[in-house]
Image: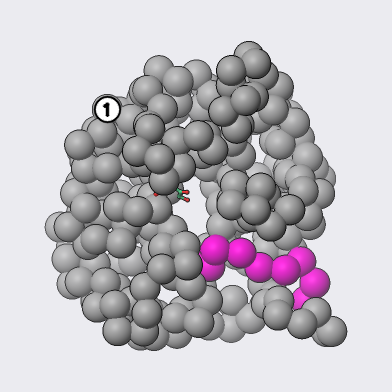
Amino acid sequence: MRTPLIAGNWKMNTDSNSAAALASEIAKRAGEVQDAELLVCPPNVYLTLVRDAIGDASVALGAQNMYHEANGAFTGEISAAMLCDLGLQYVILGHSERRHILGESDSDVNKKALAALAAGLVPVVCVGEQLADREAGKTAEVIRGQFDGSLAGITAEQIQSVVLAYEPVWAIGTGKVATPEQAEEVHADLRKQLTERYNSEIAESVRILYGGSVKPDNAAELLGQPNVDGALIGGASLKADDFLAIATAGAAVG
Ligand code: 13P
């Protein structure tokens, strides 16, 4: 059984007051969500205050990115060790905004994933096709390329500590959600790749999240798909009510 993971990617949003308020509200009401794991990923500058606002509630903390080197002259970057030092458990890697706005390659994502695993963080590795890829019938090819490139060299033991996230770029922040069938098709293919590279037992243990315009009113249908094991939520994760409603829907069908 895979426990659904409901992850909020706050992106470059909130300020110190609203980040603390949002985290406190989610922490206070975390007990409403049974049978799903909650994760929030605030901007780096608010990680400490969000950690303190969460306290000992059942809400995990993650970052939205990191650099693969351990330390040194890398101005502006932060390492996996620093995230561990703050008590984080997760880090999102290879989000499409980092791939397509900031130019990250599969090889960058791969180096980061290996460094995160070595430090004991759980990487949430994102893949997803752009609209032109989908229209050209290249979705599976693009996702397979990202899977191979981003997860190169990850051992059978390590992959069991990885979370995958399928985020079709055309569905992010657009209100245009993938249909449950479109999501399931890609998730099932990702699980097939896990089976081919590792084995079916390992493939069955890896959580694969869907992201892209997940809202309370579409969550149950998406998360009810057999290979959809949670959600990576942008806009709707900035409202505690919506985030928790998605989590409740996910837990009910997970
Ligand atoms: P939205 O939920 O705002 O579409 O964002 C999805 C996303 O990119 C989460 O990482």
The one of 162 and 91 positioned closer to us in this rendering = 91
The x, y position of residue 172, in whole percent, is: 46, 42
Rendered-image quadrant of the C terminus: top left
Query: Residue 138 placed where, x, y %?
Result: 67, 19
Residue drawn at the location 71% of the way across and 36% of the way down: 146
240 versus 204 height, above or below: below
**Residue at x 73%, y 60% (from the top left corner):** 112
Q: In the rendered view, would you say 140 is above or below 152?
A: above
In the picture, the quarter occupied by the N terminus is top left
Q: Residue at x 38, y 57 (%)?
A: 8
Q: Position of residue 117 (x, y in %)?
A: 68, 60
Q: Secondary structure at mark 1?
A: helix
Residue that badge 1 annotates:
221
Locate residue 211 relative to residue 18 in the image: left or right.
right
Q: Which residues are magenta?
A: 62-70
Q: Quadrant of residue 219?
A: top left
The answer to which quarter of the image holds residue 192 is top right
Residue pushed farthest top?
Answer: 137
In the depicted view, which residue is nearer to us: 254 or 143?
143
Q: Residues within 10 Å of mark 1 (few under 14, many from 20)?
A: some
The quadrant where residue 30 appears: bottom left
Query: Amino acid type of disc 1?
Result: Glu
Q: Position of residue 120 (x, y in %)?
A: 63, 66
- On whether residue 66 falls in the magenta region, the answer is yes
Instruction: Find out whether residue 150 is within the magenta segment.
Output: no
Q: Nearer the viewer, residue 125 or 132?
A: 132
The reply to whether residue 162 is visible in this rendering is: no
Name above or below for residue 222 compared with residue 241.
above
User: Magenta region, mostly helix, strand or loop?
Assistant: loop
- Residue 6 visible? The answer is yes
Q: Nearer the viewer, residue 168 or 60?
A: 168
